[in-house]
Amino acid sequence: MQPQQPAPTCYRHPDRPTGGLGCSRCGRPACPECLTPAAVGQHCVECVQQGRADVRPVRNQAGAVQGKRPEPYVTWALIAANVIVFAVTAIQAHSVVDNKFSALFRDWMLVPALVGHGEWVRVIGSGFLHIGPIHLLTNMFALYVLGPYCEVALGRARFISVYLVSLLGGSAAVTLLSDPLQASAGASGAIFGIFGAVAVVMLRTRQNLTQILVLLVINLIITFAVPGISIWAHLGGLLAGTAATGGILYLPRWLKASTPATAMRIGWIAVAVVGLIAVLVTVLGAPTLY
């Protein structure tokens, strides 16, 4: 008479008999707690983890990982930052309408001559200032409409990079080409950069460009027709945002990038180059008055 074979136990819980259960993928005996139903049979913990690792993430045209329910957190954060800065200026000035008389506004508004004297915080800070509530609401509504689409298409990191590069491009154009003593403020340069970014994304994905181009043309007409609007900030931001996004979406294709990782690196280099050019234009073109 042969001795009875011991009952198989779970590979993770040696004190638990499996009752004949096991992983249909690797064959290891496992208890019900350590098994997950699969399309065929059931898989153990390690096989489930390996299966998830083997699944390639879905990516969009820009190479960003496409989530099931993408939330444009960066867009909301940018809107919040602009609103908070506006609130600070309004509190300091004791006026919502005349918030430009606040200390923060005086320290951050973009004045080319002051940038030339080393007040570099104005290059970025001015992009978060707004003159009165209408100016703020107009720019934030544009960001609310355009930002989520662009953020989902490019991914959060590249979206915020394009936004900041556009802001730098607008400030660079103002610093180089505007009156040295003319003050300007607003997120318009960055917003126009997002206009350009959205147009490039839609072009790359072969969507109808009519609506975005009509909106862009209308905004350009307003830029040139309404007095007091910083034309150079709008044009500089538009150029920088369009160039940076074009570098992300088209340059890897033109250079025949062999892998997604290589394409991502090329895109980041393109954004960095556009940003570096904007910084150099600002540094070398900023006027100084003695």
Image (cartoon, grey):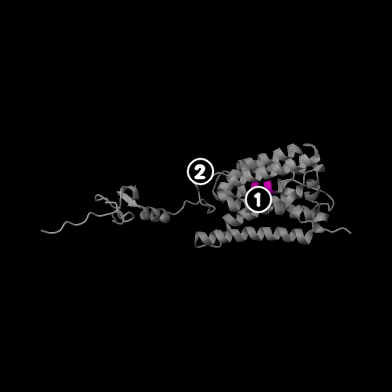
Taking 34 as reference, is 286 left or right? Answer: right
> Dot 1: what SS?
helix
> Where is residue 264 shown, x and y percent of the image?
55, 59
Residue 14 on image: x %, y %: 30, 55
> Residue 130 location, x and y as percent?
75, 43
Of the pair 7 and 140, the residue shown nearer to us? 7
Instruction: Judge whether residue 100 can be spotted in this image.
Output: yes
281 versus 152 height, above or below: below
Q: On the picture, is 58 further left or further right than 158?
A: left
In the rendered image, the residue lying farthest to the left is 1
Identify the image quadrant of residue 84.
top right
The stretch in magenta equals 190-195
Residue shown at the point (87%, 58%) measured from the top left: 289
Give how far across and how far down residue 181 sits, in percent. 85, 51
> Which of the labelled discs sits on residue 69, or is there none?
2
Residue type at mark 1? Tyr
